[in-house]
Every structure is written in C-alpha cells, then in structure tokens.
Amino acid sequence: MIHFEWLWALVALPLPLLTRWLLPVHNPIEQAALNVPFLEELVEVQTQTVFKAKSTSLGLAAIAWVLLVIACARPQWLGEPIEQAMSGRDLMMAVDLSRSMEAQDFVLNKRPVDRLTAIKAIASDFINRRVGDRLGLILFGTQAYLQTPLTFDRKTVQTLLDEAVIGLAGDNTAIGDAIGLAVKRLKNQPANSHVLILLTDGANTAGEVTPLKAAELAATNGLKIYTIGVGADEMSVPSLFGNRTVNPSLDLDEKTLIKIAESTGGYYYRARNTEELNNIYMRLDELEPIEKDKQYFRPRTELYMYPLALALGLVALLCGSKVRLS
C-alpha cells in the first residue's frame, strides 16, 4: 500500500487558488495603434488562440504543482509485514588476543591452526545463529577494548572478529578488565538478560581489576558469565632428541574461571580441540534459547522521486513553450 510520511504537506494543494483569489488581478490596458476594418474578427481569433494556449499552460502548471506537493508529502510503498524475532537478550563475547593464543594446538580442516583461528571459525556459526540477540565484541590482552557495541548486525560482529589479530591488545591477559568493561557496557541496557561469553587460554596477568572482583561486580549487576578455557592438554613439539610431548595449557587458570562462572550463575567449559569448542557453542544455544518475542516491521520504498521528476519535466515543458511563443 502507498503511505504518505508527511501527509500534512498536502494542505499546500490549494495555495495557488488562494493566491489567485486574495491578490488583485492585473489587466494591462492595451490600445490599438491602427484601425483595422476586420479588427473584431482578428481579435476574436487571437483571443481564442491565446485562451487555448493559456488553458493548456494553466492545466500543465496545475498538474506540475499537484505532483510537486505529492512529492513533498514523501510517498512510500509499504511492503508486507516481516516477522522479526527479538530475544530481549544482550550477549557480549570477550576474546583473548594475548600472545599465548599463537599456540597451534587445534586442528581445522585437517591442518594445525592457532587457537584464535579455531575460535573465529567456530564462533562464526554461533554468531549467525543468534537471530534476535544484540551482540557485542570485546577484545582483550594487556588492555580490554570494545570492538563492537551492542548491535543486531551479526555480520559486522563476525567481520570485526575475523579481522582481530593476536597481540592487537597487548601480549598479556587482562581477564578482570574485560569483565569490568562488559559490566559497564551492559548494566544500563534495558534487556531481559545479559550474558557474557569469555574465551581465554591463560591466567590474569594484567589489568586494574582482579577477575574475582570483576565477577562479583557482574553478579551484582545481573550479568551471567560463561567462561571457556581454550587449549589442548598435550601436543608434540620438536626438540634436539626428537619430538616430545608438552602441555601447552599449563598457564590456564581453570580454578579462577570456574569461580567466575559459578558466582554469576554461568558455567565453565573446557575446549581442548575444535570439536569440543563447537559442542560448547551448541550447549550455549540450549542454555540461552534464541527466540522469545516476535515483532513485525514493514519495509519501505521511497516513491517521491517519481512525482518530482514528472513535475520538473512539466515545468521544463512550460518554460520551453514560453520561449517559443516569445
């Protein structure tokens, strides 16, 4: 259906008539310079020609004015209502970019990859599934940064996560600051549920706030935190005496991550490989169901340019006719 966004603009339609009625009419007195025997017949023919020309010009001008006013009223075409799921949830992801994320103890498509690459690959599907959630992204290392404020634009969140690189926020790990930043960004948001998913492979080695103090602040503000410890328990590395097996996750502070999750009503998960990481995201989908309420919106297509173009075309035609007559 057609909808006028500024319907009040249509009150300007009778403006030319009001101007004609309110302003005095100017009729110039013309006196013939010559006396012509057949003057009456000549005047009658000329009058008819002028009347037709004026009537045509007046009609075109009236149509141009109506089209111009319609364009000013901003006509729009309203499409069919489209259903949009709204969960009423704000979901923030905090991803560790410290130097330890370079460890290549994950396998993706049958080749070894570093931890951040695995997180990007698995998180991409998770982000695409969060229809109806407002998503945000925090990147942290020595400092914590808000990379993406809360938005329904899942594609932007995914793109900015894909562009993140190890060391971008520093080499250390400020878990407490990342939680504190999430609390700051979420506490004043009018959502039914606030959730933080924190992925890290180490212990808190930087920042102004301790993780447990930040978790206490999060619990006070109703922020539920799911913590994910990333990294394999063992991997083979070359040495002078051949390959040897090491534990690349020695620095992972699981006790603190467990306390953070439990104190806020969330859970702690351990992701030793890509399969476990994917299963964790599936589990999060179950714990935080996607769809709650439904809202509808109607797509709008602007139409004002069509009557405006016709009005300008008629004005150009009138100006051209005046030039020819003169």
Image (cartoon, rainbow, N blue to C red):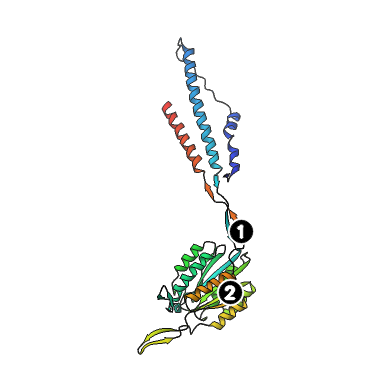
SS for callout 1? strand
Name above or below for residue 158 compared with residue 267: above
40, 6: nearer the viewer? 6
Residue matched to label 1: 294
Which residue is pictured at 56% across the width and 83% down the height? 255
Q: Quadrant of the N terminus?
A: top right
Q: Residues within 10 Å of mark 2 (few under 14, many from 20)?
A: many
Rendering coords of residue 199 (x, y %): 51, 75
Q: Is residue 314 visible?
A: yes
Residue type for callout 2 = Ile
Marks 2 and 1: which is nearer the front? 1
Q: How many marks?
A: 2
Which residue is pictured at 39% across the width and 84% down the height? 237
Name above or below for residue 93 compared with residue 15: below
Left or right position of 173 against 261: left
Q: Are marks 2 and 1 in contact (CB under 8 Å)?
A: no
Left or right position of 321 against 27: left
Rendering coords of residue 129 (x, y %): 53, 65
Q: Residues within 10 Å of mark 1 (few under 14, many from 20)?
A: few
218, 87: nearer the viewer? 87
Rendering coords of residue 287 (x, y %): 59, 71
- What is the C-alpha distance between the residues marked 2 and 1? 26 Å
SS for callout 2? strand
Q: Earlier in the sequence, mark 2 or mark 1?
A: 2
Residue matched to label 2: 225
Say which mark, if any, is on residue 265: none
Q: Is residue 208 visible?
A: no
Rendering coords of residue 185 (x, y %): 57, 68
Residue found at the very far right of the displayed protein: 220
Left or right position of 146 against 262: left
Residue type for callout 1 = Lys
